[in-house]
Amino acid sequence: MSAIHQSGTRKRAVARATLTKGTGIVRINRQALSSIPKTLYRSKIEEPLLLAGDAIKKINISVNVFGGGINSQADAIRTAIAKSLAEHDKKLKKLFLDYDRSLLVPDVRRKETHKPGNHGKARASRQTSYR
C-alpha cells in the first residue's frame, strides 16, 4: 500500500491526512491523538476511526492542520480522515455516507458578510417609521 493523501476543509481550516502502513498510530500536528484532552473536539475526530473499527489497526494516520478555530479544525480533521479511510477501503465510503454525510462532504457554510451602511450586524437595519 502506498501512502494515501486526502484533505478536508471547514471555514478557514485545512487538514491534510496521510495514511501509511503501520500499527494504528494517529498523529495530529506530530502529537498523538491521546494527548488531545477528552472534549467534543476529540470525539468529533474519533468518529470515523470508531466507525472504521479494525480497518485502522494496520495503518498509521498523520494529519497536518492549520487555520481556523478549534471547532473548524476538528471538522476539517474529521473530513480528511474519513476521506482517506474511504479511499483505502471502498466499503467504508457507503458506511460513512449512511452514518453522516458530513464525514465525506465538507460543510460549506460561511459567516455572512456585512452589508453597506452603518447598521451593526450583517442583516440588521434601522426600523422604518411610516408616520
Image (tube, rainbow, N blue to C red):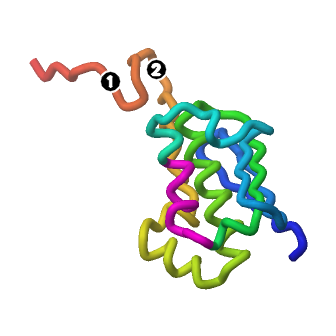
| Element class at badge 1 | loop
Task: Give the farthest residue toward the left.
Answer: 131
Residue 120, by quadrant, is: top left
Pointer 2 or 1: first along the chain: 2
Provide the residue designation for mark 2: 117
**Residue stretch rendered in magenta on the structure:** 44-54
- The percent position of residue 7, horizontal first and vertical second, equals 73, 57
Label disc, if present, on residue 73 of the rendered structure:
none
Residue 21: x and y, percent?
A: 83, 67
**Total of numbered circles in the picture?**
2
Magenta residues, dominant SS class = helix
Give how far across and how far down residue 50 sits, in percent: 51, 61
For the point 48% across and 37% down, the residue is 112
Q: Is residue 127 above or below residue 28?
A: above
Instruction: Measuring from the top left, give residue 47's x and y in whole percent.
Output: 50, 57
Q: Please say whether residue 74 is one of the residues in the magenta stretch.
A: no
Residue in the picture at 57% in, 40% down: 72
103 vs 107, nearest the viewer: 103
Q: Residue at x 44, y 66 (%)?
A: 100
Q: In the figure, 31 relative to 128: above or below? A: below
Tell me: 102 left or right of 36: left
> Is residue 89 rendered to the left or right of residue 22?
left
Cα separation between marks 2 and 1: 8 Å
Amino acid marked by disc 1: Ser
Q: Are marks 2 and 1 in contact (CB under 8 Å)?
A: yes
Mark 2 secondary-structure assignment: loop
Q: Which three-letter amino acid code belongs to the residue tagged 2?
A: Gly
The crowd level at tag 2 (other Cα within 10 Å; few <14, some 14-19, many 20+) is: few
Name the foreground residue: 123 vs 78.
Answer: 78
Q: Tag on residue 125? A: 1
